[in-house]
Image: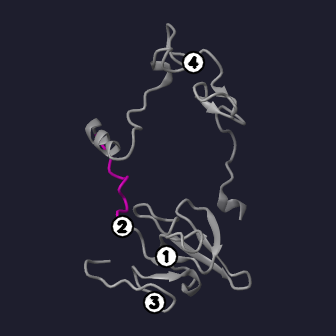
Amino acid sequence: MYTGQFIYCGKKASLECGNVLPLSSVPEGTIVCNVESYVGDRGSFARGSGCFAVVVSHDDDKGTTRLRLPSGGKKTVKSNVRAQIGVVAGGGRTDKPLLKAGRAYHKYAVKRNCWPKIRGVAKNPVEHPHGGGNHQHIGMPSTVAKDRPSGRKVGLIGARRTGRLRGVKKTAQDKD
């Protein structure tokens, strides 16, 4: 896309980068972005920088379309949901390292208060359930039940299993 480009929306819009079309009028194998999950929700899939989804197949009998999302998973949506043709700008943004704390500070300052991440064992006992003690150790099981009160719910919440993952991991592509 470029400055001053005309963007056309609707069933009759041509299949060009930037135009918004219903998935029913998009051929299989087309790269799309900003795909709606429900009709009229203004887009919810493949919106991050450099992201795109691929139209895998159409099922005309059910009126659905199968997409391959940036995560690698497949999703079935209604064929009358809209999508923008092309790839979101800003691909490769995460390839360059931040290199210094100041860049990380300014990156997260505009987002939300989630940096720096301080470990619970490095804190005092009044600040975190894992804090305190003469050595930095948790001193209790790191797993905690889902129904514990909010101040105690730290660590591995409602864990089905813990420890190192052993064996071959099944991915979404292997299951299909």
Q: CA distance from mark 4 to mark 3?
A: 60 Å
Q: Amino acid at mark 3?
A: Ala
- Which residue is found at the position 49% from the left and 65% from the top? 46
The residue range painted magenta reads: 89-99
Q: Secondary structure at mark 4?
A: loop
Which residue is labeled 2 in the image? 89
- Which residue is found at the position 57% from the left and 26% from the top? 151
> Quick one: quadrant of the N terminus?
bottom left
Badge 1 crowding class, 10 Å Cα cut-off, few under 14, some 14 to 19, many 20 or more, is many
Q: Amino acid at mark 4?
A: Ile
- Which residue is found at the position 49% from the left and 92% from the top? 12
Q: Position of residue 169 (x, y in %)?
A: 67, 48
Which residue is labeled 4 in the image? 138
Rendered view: 29 above or below 107:
below
Nearer to us of marks 4 and 3 is 3
> Quick one: quadrant of the C terminus?
bottom right
Q: Which mark is residue 120?
A: none
Decide which of tag 2 and tag 1 comes sooner along the chain.
1
Q: Position of residue 38 (x, y in %)?
A: 60, 70
Which quadrant of the structure image shows residue 57? bottom right
Look at the numbered discs 1 and 4 and tell me whether their residues touch, using CB distance below 8 Å.
no
Decide which of tag 4 and tag 3 comes sooner along the chain.
3
Q: Amino acid at mark 1?
A: Ile
Q: CA distance from mark 2 to mark 1?
A: 13 Å
Q: Which mark is residue 13?
A: 3
Q: Secondary structure at mark 3?
A: loop
Left or right: 103 as drawn, with respect to 170: left
